[in-house]
Image: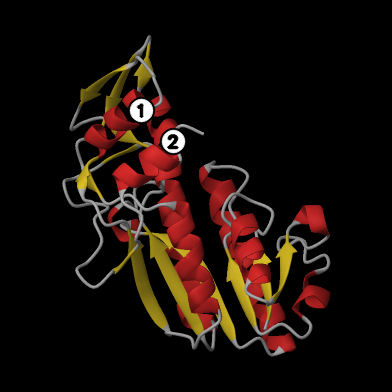
């Protein structure tokens, strides 16, 4: 199969491209760095030619409310239009578990807009919602850090390893479209504050973690179940403890 990965030079996208190539597929990393720009449209139609599926894991360069809304709206509209011309059979989008619960946050509002555009306009699609990545725990710790003390939400999460998300995205892209939303989560459910503390200790980071139900998560307060997946979600195979042992020390 020929698969175009929009955002293919980024953290998730580069891993998706590498895995698809290893599986024997023709995978193209689509990004401004490779001459494919989903905002201006530059190189987009050429990249779509002969493509069977498109995986969109792109991200806005700005989290400003207007900029992030414009990015996902323009990019997604351009992608879907180019796919129709090229006859692409499957559009796959990476989103976030709990998006509908965080609509006061501009980024999550923009992702919901992106999902809705796809549901309305794509002929064959799969919206893939993933939980928070284990790899982003350091960024979560930094959010609430003041002078070596970090306040972290006590909201429940089911962190997933990036490698598990990459595996599922490749599996979905090489199969039939779901024409619906599916969820991918890690196997372990725990409080965000507990996972951040374990992560920091494993890294030898001496910062003190304060479990704070009012701590902001990228500008939003999490309820207990705000970002918890549904009972029918796909589960990754990498546990948090295994990830800490194998990856957090690197």
Task: Using the rendered view, name the quadrant where residue 194 is placed.
Answer: top left
Q: Is residue 13 above or below residue 168?
A: above
- Most foreground residue, 45 or 231: 231
Does the CB distance between marks 1 and 2 fall below 8 Å? yes
Task: Using the rendered view, name the quadrant where residue 243 is placed.
Answer: top left
The crowd level at tag 1 (other Cα within 10 Å; few <14, some 14-19, many 20+) is: few
The crowd level at tag 2 (other Cα within 10 Å; few <14, some 14-19, many 20+) is: some
Q: Position of residue 171 (x, y in %)?
A: 49, 76
In the image, 203: left or right of 33?
left
Measure how far apart labels 1 and 2 are at the Cα level: 7 Å
Q: How many marks?
A: 2
Residue at x 65% of width, y 62% of height: 18
| Residue identifier under label 2 | 248
Residue at x 41% of width, y 25% of height: 203
- Most foreground residue, 165 or 220: 165
- Residue at the top extreme, as displayed: 147
Dot label at residue 110: none
Q: Is residue 37 above or below residue 51?
A: above
Q: Position of residue 178 (x, y in %)?
A: 42, 84
- Most foreground residue, 47 or 233: 233
Task: Using the rendered view, name the quadrant where residue 64 is placed.
Answer: top right
In the image, 249: left or right of 202?
right
| Residue identifier under label 1 | 202
């Amino acid at each position: 199969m020929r698969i175009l990965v929009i955002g293919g030079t980024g953290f998730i996208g580069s891993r998706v491209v590498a895995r698809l190539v290893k599986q024997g597929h023709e995978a193209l990393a689509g990004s401004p760095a490779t001459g494919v720009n989903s905002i201006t449209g530059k190189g987009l139609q050429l990249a779509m030619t002969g493509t069977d599926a498109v995986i969109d894991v792109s991200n806005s360069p700005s989290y400003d409310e207007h900029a992030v809304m414009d990015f996902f709206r323009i990019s997604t509209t351009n992608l879907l239009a180019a796919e129709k011309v090229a006859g692409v059979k499957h559009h796959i989008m990476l989103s976030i578990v709990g998006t509908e619960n965080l609509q006061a946050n501009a980024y999550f509002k923009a992702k919901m807009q992106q999902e809705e555009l796809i549901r309305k306009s794509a002929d064959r699609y799969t919206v893939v919602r993933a939980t928070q990545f284990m790899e982003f725990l350091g960024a979560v710790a930094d959010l609430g850090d003041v002078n070596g003390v970090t306040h972290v939400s006590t909201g429940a999460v089911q962190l997933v390893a990036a490698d598990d998300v990459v595996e599922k995205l490749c599996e979905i892209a090489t199969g039939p479209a779901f024409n619906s939303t599916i969820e991918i989560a890690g196997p372990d459910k725990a409080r965000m504050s507990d996972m951040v503390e374990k992560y920091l200790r494993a890294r030898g980071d001496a910062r003190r973690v304060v479990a704070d139900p009012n701590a902001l998560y990228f500008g939003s307060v999490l309820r207990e179940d705000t970002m918890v997946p549904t009972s029918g979600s796909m589960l990754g195979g990498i546990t948090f403890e295994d990830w800490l042992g194998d990856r957090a020390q690197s």
